[in-house]
C-alpha cells in the first residue's frame, strides 16, 4: 500500500508515489493484488520505481484463497505468477491469506497447494481460525505443513488494538473487521514476517510494539531477515511510525542498515 489518501502531498507527491514511498520504507504489503491480478506492465512500473532489494509481500488473489479455497486454481495462479515476474528479486514473499473459516481440517488442502507451487518464490501463510492459536495440535499440524514447504506463518498482532474500546471512526471500523486472536511470535524460517496493528494514538502504538522490538532484535541476532509492517486504524502516520520502529530496533542492533532519507515532497506551484 503506497497510495493512502492522507499521505498525498504530505509524505508523497501526486506522481511516482511508489518511488517516494520506497525512500520512507524498504518493504510494502501488496494488498491490492488480493482484489485483482495486476497487468504485467503495471508490475513492471513497480519494479522501475524500486531498487532490487526493495521487498514486496504480495497477497494472492482472493479467487485463489477465498473463492476456490486453494482448489482448482491452476489458471488464476499461473496468471498471477506471470504478472508479477517483472519484480524479480523484489518479490520477497507471496502472501497466502486464508479466510477465518479455513480450519485445521483444511490443512491437507493447504499442504497440497503449497506442494504444487514453484520453488522460485518464497511463501508466507496467514490464518485466522482461532483453533490454530488455541489448540496445540492444530498449531503443530500447520507448522509441520509450512515447514515442509519452507513457508512462513504470518502473525497479525491485534492484541494492542483490542486492549480498550475504540475512540475514533477508524478504530470503530477496525474493531468490527480485524481478527481478535492470541499473540504469536515464533519464526519458522529465516524470513519472518509480522503484521502489527496499533491505535490511532501514536503513543499507544509505540507502547504496544515494544514486545516486537525485542523479538525482531533477537531474530536479527540469530541471522534472520525479518519484515515488520506497522499499521494503525487510520494509517495516517504509518510510514513515520515504521521508521520509528526501525530506529528502535537499530538502537538494539547497531549493525542493522539505516533506512534511506525520504525524498522531499516539492510544494505545489501554480506556474
Image: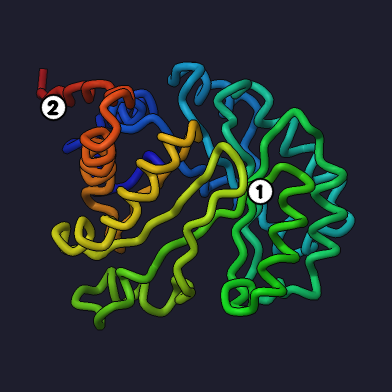
Who's the residue at 21% across and 48% down the image? 237
Secondary structure under the numbered disc 1 in the rendered image: loop
Q: Quadrant of the N terminus?
A: top left
The CA span between labels 2 and 1 is: 37 Å
> Which residue sits at x=65%, y=52%?
96
Q: Residue furthest bottom?
A: 165
Q: Along the polypeptide, which appears first: circle 2 or circle 1?
A: 1
In this picture, is 254 found above or below 148? Answer: above
Residue 160, x across and y down, in percent: 30, 69
In the displayed structure image, the side of residue 158 where residue 265 appears, left or right: left
Label 1 Cα neighbours within 10 Å, binned few <14 / some 14-19 / many ≥20: many
Tell me if residue 36 can be seen. no
User: Horizontal and vertical percent for residue 19?
Assistant: 36, 23
Give the labeled residue for mark 1.
60
Q: Are marks 2 and 1 in contact (CB under 8 Å)?
A: no
Determine whether 179 is above or below 266 in the image.
Answer: below
Q: Nearer the viewer, residue 209 or 239?
A: 209
Residue at numbered disc 2: 268
Q: Give the left or right position of residue 217, taking residue 96 as reference.
A: left
Q: Quadrant of residue 77?
A: top right
Can the viewer see residue 243 in this picture?
Answer: yes
Q: Quadrant of the C terminus?
A: top left
Can you tell which of label 2 and label 1 is closer to the viewer? Answer: 1
Amino acid at each position: 500500500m503506497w497510495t493512502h489518501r492522507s499521505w498525498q502531498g504530505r509524505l508523497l507527491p501526486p506522481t511516482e508515489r511508489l518511488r517516494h514511498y520506497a525512500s520512507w520504507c524498504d518493504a510494502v504489503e501488496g494488498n491490492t493484488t488480493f482484489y485483482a491480478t495486476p497487468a504485467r506492465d503495471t508490475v513492471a512500473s513497480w519494479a522501475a520505481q524500486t531498487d532490487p532489494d526493495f521487498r514486496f509481500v504480495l497477497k494472492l488473489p482472493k479467487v485463489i484463497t477465498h473463492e476456490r479455497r486453494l482448489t482448482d486454481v491452476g489458471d488464476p495462479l499461473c496468471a498471477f505468477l506471470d504478472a508479477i515476474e517483472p519484480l524479480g528479486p523484489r518479490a520477497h514473499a507471496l502472501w497466502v491469506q486464508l479466510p477465518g473459516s479455513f480450519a485445521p481440517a483444511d490443512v491437507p488442502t493447504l499442504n497440497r497447494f503449497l506442494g504444487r507451487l514453484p520453488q522460485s518464490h518464497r511463501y508466507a501463510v496467514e490464518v485466522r481460525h482461532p483453533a490454530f492459536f488455541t489448540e496445540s495440535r492444530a498449531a503443530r499440524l500447520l507448522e509441520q505443513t509450512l515447514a515442509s514447504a519452507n513457508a512462513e506463518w504470518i502473525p497479525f498482532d491485534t492484541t494492542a488494538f483490542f486492549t480498550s474500546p475504540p475512540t475514533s471512526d477508524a478504530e470503530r471500523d477496525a474493531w468490527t473487521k480485524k481478527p481478535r486472536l492470541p499473540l504469536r511470535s515464533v519464526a519458522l524460517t529465516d524470513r519472518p514476517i509480522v503484521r502489527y496493528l496499533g491505535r490511532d494514538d501514536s503513543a499507544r502504538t509505540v507502547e504496544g510494539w515494544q514486545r516486537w522490538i525485542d523479538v525482531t532484535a533477537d531474530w536479527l541476532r540469530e541471522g534472520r531477515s525479518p519484515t515488520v509492517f506497522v499499521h494503525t486504524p487510520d494509517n495516517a502516520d504509518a510510514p513515520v511510525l515504521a521508521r520509528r520502529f526501525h530506529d528502535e530496533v537499530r538502537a538494539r542492533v547497531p549493525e542493522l542498515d539505516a533506512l534511506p532519507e525520504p525524498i522531499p515532497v516539492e510544494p505545489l506551484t501554480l506556474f
